[in-house]
Image (cartoon, rainbow, N blue to C red):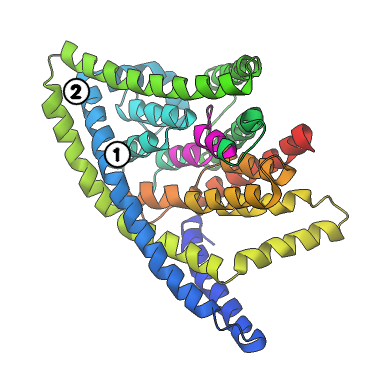
């Protein structure tokens, strides 16, 4: 089956499987609540999709405005030149020094700092710039797919939101999952780059990429060591402060760069911010489609049956099934960030924040990103309908993250 049809058939499967399971429950078990629950889910999911898009409008306007200042102030071009040696290898179809490389860097940096609200509009800006280079406007290009996989692999240095949830749920050491998440997300991203490079026939065995990967490994090791020297309270404060200081520094730096170039920064901001509303409106249909399919699948009980089946299979093979209780978070994460967050909170509520399952759920939440949400939003914003190998590469990166998360959880907490 062509890769660009994967999302189509997964979406269809959500409804067909959910309907069959609900019908069986009604006919054989007299469950008269399942179909009303499924219909309620369609309406609530549609409302959620609209609310997400509406909520993104202000954030999109803010960051697209800031990016426009950076673009006119020359910051984006400077970043593009600095990253050109690396990005020319990972994104060979993008012209050297093109401004999109700066947008890609800003998006990846925001993701690494756990700044989701900043990362999304920056990512949408990058997709729009790549679409300008796209000769087939309805088909994803190789750079688009590599960029999407880098996003779905979820490389995060500071998982602020997860640390906050653990603290709220009463974890004795909310930050004890910090290093495991960092390791799991690193392996997920590394796997995503390798897999996508194989699909796109990109040679990774060159000095530039090897130096970058080696440098990234050293940075990860340094961050792990540095934060390992801090107690839990100080680690939370340093993580939160670092992320917010860097974010405000970026905003001020862009404004100062605009002033230096004698740009009317206010007008530049307004010019960029105007695109925020139209972009938010464009993604509504794609979000409705994805979230409704997921909601129906969950409401029918299909997710619960899938988890129970996996647990039985693992135990039948003589394996340790302790990790299975956390799998709903892992399986939901590629589909819905809010759904996976709910699964994570439910796992900590049911089993305890400091239980193996509770901790593993948090690692799952931080090790990958919402593949189908990102695909729907990013590709939907520029009208891409033929996704080629994007879904395949994204899901394989997710799988690598899940496997790494399980292995690391057993290493640290098993």
Region in magenta: 147-166
> Relative to the observer, which residue lies in front, 246 or 394?
246
> Relative to the observer, which residue lies in front, 145 or 378?
378
Label 1 crowd bin: few (<14), some (14–19), many (20+), radius 10 Å: many
Question: Percent x, y for residue 282?
Answer: 27, 53
Q: Is residue 152 magenta?
A: yes
Residue corresponding to mark 1: 59
Question: Percent x, y for residue 216?
Answer: 56, 20
Sequence-wise first label, 2 or 1: 1
Counting the numbered discs, the total is 2
* As drawn, 352 above or below 217: below
Closer to the eye: label 2 or 1? 1
Q: Residue at x 53, y 46 (%)?
A: 394
* As drawn, 14 above or below 355: below
Residue 268 lies in quadrant: top left
Instruction: Say left or right for 45 vs 227.
Output: left
Label 2 to label 1, Cα distance in Å?
A: 20 Å
> Relative to the observer, which residue lies in front, 336 or 14?
336
Question: Percent x, y for residue 358?
Answer: 67, 44
Checking the image for residue 399, the label placed there is none
Residue corresponding to mark 2: 72
Give the residue at the far top of this rendering: 260
> Relative to the observer, which residue lies in front, 232 or 220?
232
Q: Main secondary structure of the magenta part?
A: helix
Q: Secondary structure at mark 1?
A: helix
Q: Residue at x 12, y 14 (%)?
A: 262
Q: Secondary structure at mark 2?
A: helix
């Amino acid at each position: 089956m062509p890769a660009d049809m994967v999302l189509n058939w997964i979406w269809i499967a959500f409804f067909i499987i959910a309907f069959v399971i609900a019908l069986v429950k009604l006919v054989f078990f007299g469950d008269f609540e399942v179909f009303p629950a499924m219909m309620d889910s369609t309406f609530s999911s549609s409302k959620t999709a609209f609310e997400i898009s509406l909520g993104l409008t202000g954030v999109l306007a803010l960051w697209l405005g800031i990016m426009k200042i950076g673009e006119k102030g020359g910051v984006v071009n400077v970043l593009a030149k600095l990253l050109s040696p690396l990005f020319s290898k990972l994104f060979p179809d993008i012209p050297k020094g093109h401004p999109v490389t700066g947008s890609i860097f800003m998006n990846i940096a925001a993701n690494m700092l756990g700044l989701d609200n900043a990362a999304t509009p920056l990512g949408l800006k990058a997709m729009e710039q790549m679409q300008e280079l796209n000769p087939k406007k309805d088909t994803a290009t190789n750079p688009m797919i590599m960029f999407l996989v880098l996003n779905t692999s979820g490389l995060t240095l500071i998982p602020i939101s997860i640390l906050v949830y653990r603290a709220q749920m009463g974890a004795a050491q909310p930050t004890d999952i910090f290093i495991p998440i960092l390791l799991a997300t690193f392996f997920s991203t590394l796997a995503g780059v390798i897999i996508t490079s194989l699909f796109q026939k990109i040679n990774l065995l060159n000095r530039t990429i090897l130096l970058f990967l080696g440098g990234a490994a050293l940075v990860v090791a340094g961050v792990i060591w540095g934060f390992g020297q801090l107690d839990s309270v100080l680690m939370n404060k340093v993580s939160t402060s670092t992320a917010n200081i860097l974010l405000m520094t970026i905003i001020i730096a862009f404004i100062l760069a605009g002033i230096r170039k004698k740009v009317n920064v206010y007008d530049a901001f307004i010019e960029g911010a105007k695109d925020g509303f139209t972009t938010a409106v464009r993604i509504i249909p794609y979000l409705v489609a994805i979230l409704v399919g997921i909601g129906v699948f969950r409401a029918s009980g299909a997710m619960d049956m899938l988890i129970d089946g996996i647990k039985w299979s693992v135990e039948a093979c003589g394996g340790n099934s302790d990790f299975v209780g956390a799998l709903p978070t892992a399986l939901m994460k590629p589909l819905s960030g809010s759904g996976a967050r709910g699964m994570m909170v439910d796992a900590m509520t049911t089993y305890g924040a400091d239980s193996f399952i509770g901790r593993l759920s948090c690692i799952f939440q931080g090790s990958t990103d919402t593949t189908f949400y990102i695909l729907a939003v990013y590709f939907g914003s520029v009208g891409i309908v033929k996704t080629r190998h994007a879904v395949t590469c994204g899901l394989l990166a997710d799988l690598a993250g899940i496997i790494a998360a399980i292995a690391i959880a057993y290493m640290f907490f098993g």
